[in-house]
Image (cartoon, helix red, strand yellow):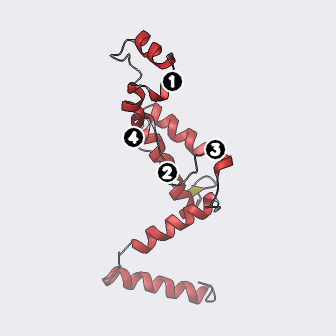
Amino acid sequence: MEKMAGCLLGRAHGFALLEGAGGLWLDEIFSPQQLVIDAEIQRFVQSIAADLRPGAQDIVTVMREGTQGRGFLATDLTLDRFRDYMWRSSLFDLRARASWTGDQRTLMDKAAHVATQKAAAYSYELTGDRREALDAIMARAKREFGGAL
């Protein structure tokens, strides 16, 4: 909730960049699961595109249509525009809790699965001088820390 609040507040005040995605405990620890969750939060906040200026529709006509039997969910205005206000999460289960069946994984399990898939799809390979320098650093770390790495 804290990450969502900060992201939403930043969006409301026009900040184009928020930092700390994937960070835990004051951004001192990186978590791939938190990175996936933060990306989902960003997608939600980015989807908020409500235009709060007065619309072209006559409000009395819209209200009348919504209250004359069919309800607002069946009005042409709602059907034409609901995607402008609807966000479908790929991570969070936004259905009523009573309908949660089948996928019983926790949010962290789902995020870990997404992070693992993304990492497996990544094809970057470090070569050349940088690879040799990194290998030397890792070899030194293994010697100095007793092979724990």
Q: What's the distance in space between the residues labelled 4 and 3, CA to CA?
A: 33 Å
Q: Farthest front residue?
A: 69
Name above or below for residue 33 compared with residue 41. Answer: below
**Which residue is the site of mark 4?**
16
Is residue 25 visible in this depiction of the protein? yes
Picture quadrant where residue 103 is located: bottom right
Q: Name the quarter where the C terminus is drawn.
A: bottom right
Q: What's the distance in space between the residues labelled 2 and 1, CA to CA?
A: 31 Å
Q: What's the distance in space between the residues labelled 1 and 3, CA to CA?
A: 21 Å
Q: Nearer the viewer, residue 20 or 60?
A: 60
**Which residue is the site of mark 1?**
71
**Which residue is the site of mark 3?**
96
The amino acid beneath tag 1 is Gly
Callout in the foreground (2, 3): 3
Is residue 49 visible in this depiction of the protein? no
**Which residue is the site of mark 2?**
40
Q: Nearer the viewer, residue 125 or 43?
A: 43
| Pointer 1 or 3: first along the chain | 1
| Residue 11 percent across, percent down from the top left | 45, 36
Picture quadrant where residue 77 is located: top left
Label 4: element kind: loop
Label 2: element kind: helix
Callout in the foreground (2, 4): 2
